[in-house]
Image (cartoon, rainbow, N blue to C red):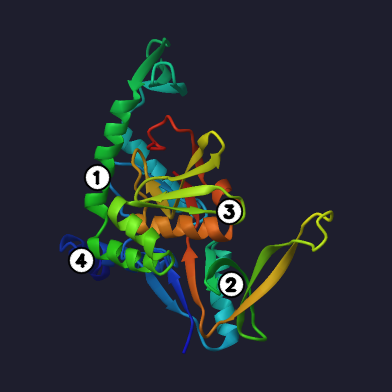
Amino acid sequence: MDKADEAALKRLQSGNWDVEMQQRAWDNGLHAGMMVPLFTIGMSCAAGYFSDKFLDSVAEFENSQDGPRTTSYINSWYSTKLQAHVIIYKVLATGKIKHMVRRIDSEVVEFIIQTAQVAATTYKVEHEMKAMTKLKTHVSKSQFCSYLTTGAFFEISKRSGVCYIFRRCRPTIACRLEPKGWRYLAALCTHPVGYYKGTWCGGLVPSDDVIAHLMMMRADEWKFWSKSNQHASLPPQANI
Amino acid sequence: MAGVIEVLAAGAGHNEVTLNTDPKEAKKQIDDFVSKRYALFVSIEGQDHKVHHFDEATNEIVVETVEVVTPEVPAVPAVTKTVEKRVSALQAKVTAVAPTAGG
């Protein structure tokens, strides 16, 4: 280990991982920083941001953590009738096809717990406060009050008339007011830099994600939809 | 006075990159972000717009916005036209959003 690595290790051990990560990212020309790697939760990184080499190393690391594969995935879907996630898989040793039913409420609880764990380990209060200060300059007083007190605010697109509900650490809900009432369109989920799998957490602090969603919606609504995963209301990813 | 690019960043929160007062250098900075597939947004007249390009000759950030023109005669359908708007690079506060991954 050379002196630079030793110094980096000391910074990491002293709890200044964010400073260390930032420095490493800047050295590699990544202006938006690096996601904090967690060894228990997988990451999905933005392809255009990280190099292919980096993405390959993340995938390789995740595969090495999984151990030898005993099953292979075939298909899965959300059943509205069962209110559950049905997964079909093959047991490699016997070749038998099996299924697994996971209730949506248990998946949601898992999402909530994992999200809380990731937030507690990777986010810092001062970064979130900084992001909220910036958000305040982009929204109206009433929108900010709503965000601060309930964690969500809404805005109707001047271009399409679609109403967007921006939520802290949750996907943005797109809906439309029709004569019969509100019609749910989709939960739009996209994270600059990347996100942690099985959670609603992105690489950026939650309010930075909200700013990104808001700006994309206002300035490039079409791209906001095309870049986002569009979740139906049932899966836990949508958090409806 | 110089404009700034505020990058929404992971790790240590926001990064601020000061735009160079030399238009050539400022253009290089903007182009660097665009080539790395960042989405750049700038506020003009209280509205957020996506940055289209940097005009080195006038040291301005250029955005293009689509506006609906409603004709005075009701029978004629409304048309859309692209309007160019500009903001001086010396006053601009640009927000940079890194490439995204759908969650």
Question: Is mark 3 in CB contact (under 8 Å) with mark 4?
Answer: no
Q: How far apart are marks 3 and 1 (CA)?
A: 30 Å
Q: Mark 1 lies on which chain?
A: A
> What amino acid type should be assigned to the residue bearing mark 4?
Arg
Secondary structure under tag 3 reads: helix
**Amino acid carrying mark 1 in the image:** Ala
Question: Dot 4, crowdedness within 10 Å: few (<14), some or many (≥20)?
Answer: some
Secondary structure beneath label 1:
helix
Q: Mark 4 points at which residue?
A: A11
Which residue is situated farthest in the left direction here? Answer: A14
Q: Residue at x 53, y 71 (%)?
A: B42
Please state the chain letter of the residue tagged with numbered disc 4 in the rendered image: A
- Residue A88 shows in this picture: yes
Mark 3 or 1, which is nearer the eye? 3
Nearest to viewer (mark 4 / mark 1): 1
Quarter of the image for residue A24 reads: bottom left
Residue at 34% across, 38% down: A198
| Label 3 sits on residue | A221
